[in-house]
């Protein structure tokens, strides 16, 4: 319906595609979800600024799907892009950046790339401590991840 009314390249269509992709993901229809997320990402890349938070949203969800599908090499550049977009959108010391760093570090850890994961966890920890305080649960989770890595 949105495609007919707004045109296939409208950002609102990308949101509908994201929603459909999430539904397919829940139903374990991963190939269909991948196709829908990729279409949404294509629309958002053309329609939005390169640092727009909605672009990061689609990038992150496609990366999560790739990770779930075992396509880790396809997930890495998307997680890296999510970090980059969040840094541009929110600044380098925002908790959202730390969360994106942790997501990438977890992926590297799963790929046994511990040398790449370590500085990401350390940077995320510093951001969480500075922005949320040392007693915040995310600080504890990141410390745990660091301990497991070391």
Image (spheres, grey):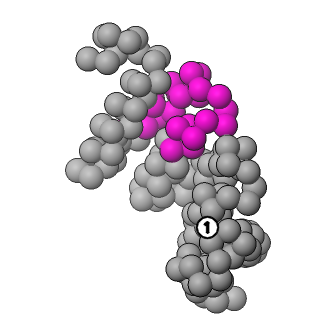
Dominant secondary structure, magenta: helix
Residue 111 percent coordinates (x, y)? 60, 69
Residue 147 percent coordinates (x, y)? 64, 89
What residue is shown at x 59% (from left), y 22% (from top)?
46
Instruction: Identify which residue, 62 or 15, lies in the foreground.
Output: 15
Part of the protein shown in magenta? 35-57
Question: Is residue 116 something one can see in this rendering?
Answer: yes
Element type at mark 1 = helix
Instruction: Identify which residue, 10 or 74, lies in the foreground.
Output: 10
Characterize the local packing of mark 1: few (<14), some (14-19) or many (20 or more) Cα atoms within 10 angstroms.
Answer: many
| 87 left or right of 3 in image | right
What residue is shown at x 61% (from left), y 67% (from top)?
102
Q: Is residue 28 magenta?
A: no
Q: Is residue 113 above or below residue 24?
A: below
| 39 left or right of 72 in image | left
Name the residue tied to disc 1: 102
Determine the image quadrant of residue 85.
top right
Q: Is residue 55 above or below residue 121?
A: above
Determine the image quadrant of residue 145.
bottom right
């Amino acid at each position: 319906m949105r495609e007919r009314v707004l045109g296939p390249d409208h950002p609102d269509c990308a949101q509908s595609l994201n929603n459909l992709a999430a539904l397919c993901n829940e139903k374990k229809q991963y190939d269909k979800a991948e196709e829908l997320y990729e279409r949404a990402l294509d629309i958002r890349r053309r329609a939005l600024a390169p640092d727009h938070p909605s672009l990061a949203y689609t990038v992150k969800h496609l990366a999560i799907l790739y990770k779930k599908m075992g396509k880790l090499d396809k997930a890495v550049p998307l997680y890296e892009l999510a970090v980059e977009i969040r840094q541009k959108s929110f600044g380098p010391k925002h908790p959202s950046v730390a969360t994106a760093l942790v997501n990438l570090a977890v992926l590297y850890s799963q790929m046994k790339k511990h040398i790449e994961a370590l500085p990401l966890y350390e940077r995320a920890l510093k951001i969480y401590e500075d922005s949320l305080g040392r007693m915040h649960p995310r600080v504890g989770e990141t410390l745990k991840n660091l301990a497991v890595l070391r």
